[in-house]
Amino acid sequence: MAYTEGELLQRAAAGNRQAFSTLYEDCLHDLYQYLYLFTRSKETTEDIIQEIFVKLWEQKAQLTAIRSFRQYLFRMARNKVIDHIRSRRLHHRVTADLLAGADASYADCDHKTLTSQYFHIARQAVEQLPDKRRLIFRLNTEEQLSLDEIASRLNISKSVVKKQLYAAQHYVRRYLREHAELIHLLVAFAYLH
């Protein structure tokens, strides 16, 4: 039985994963094409799509208020692209300003310091993940295991692995974004002294 978009939104808002998957699948191709026009990166496009649908699922109760899912989805996508571009520009501008203000030896040293601090903050983010999510994240990033391999090793379903991995990646990225500005300020402060 085919459901209307309104019915799918109602069912997804009530927690029906199949209805949510149908909404996802109906828009995925067009959404990917739209985002890729701006990002020109498969990985960035997939990350943005993941962030959008994770947020939609986390706030699924609000799906009933949406009149046009497609319009709502593409508005979210546009906002995410704008955020992504702003974040990238800010990061590049601050890094370029900081590196341009020092001689080559300081620039090299501070670039290493900045990289080291990013790595340290990323480790902090990973350590804050729940135990199972942290294990799945590490198996994927450190041991380079696929979703199927992780599922087999932990004796859980691939969909659970995928959900946990996406949640971990989303949290780590958000944590890095929130703490990255602090790193830039610390390096800038070091230049002033």
Image: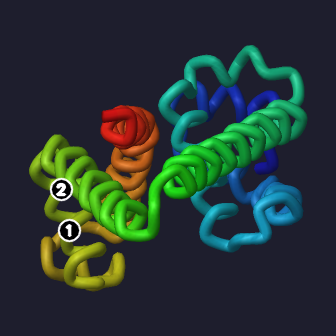
Residue 129: quarter of image: top left
How far apart are the two marked residues, 2 and 1, measured between alpha carbons? Answer: 6 Å
Q: Residue at x 65, y 53 (%)?
A: 49
Q: Quadrant of the C terminus?
A: top left
Q: Residue at x 86, y 40 (%)?
A: 70
Residue 43: quarter of image: bottom right
Viewer-proximal residue among 142 and 186 = 186
Residues under numbered marks 2 and 1 in contact, where contact means CB atoms less than 8 Å apart: yes
Q: Secondary structure at mark 2?
A: helix
Amino acid on which disc 2 is placed? Arg
- Where 81 sits versus 156, above or below? above
Residue occupied by mark 1: 138
Amino acid on which disc 1 is placed? Arg
In this figure, what is the number of numbered marks?
Answer: 2
Residue 130: quarter of image: top left
Q: Secondary structure at mark 1?
A: helix
Residue 19 percent across, percent down from the top left: 64, 44
- Where 26 sits versus 155, above or below? above
Q: Residue at x 42, y 55 (%)?
A: 166
Q: Is 190 placed left or right of 166 in the picture?
A: left
- Where 59 sits versus 169, above or below? above
Viewer-proximal residue among 18 and 108 = 108
Q: Residue furthest toward the top? A: 65
Q: Which mark is residue 134?
A: 2
Viewer-proximal residue among 110 and 127 = 110
Q: Is 183 placed left or right of 65 in the picture?
A: left
Looking at the image, can residue 186 be seen? Answer: yes
Q: Residue at x 28, y 74 (%)?
A: 140
Q: Is 49 placed left or right of 40 in the picture?
A: left
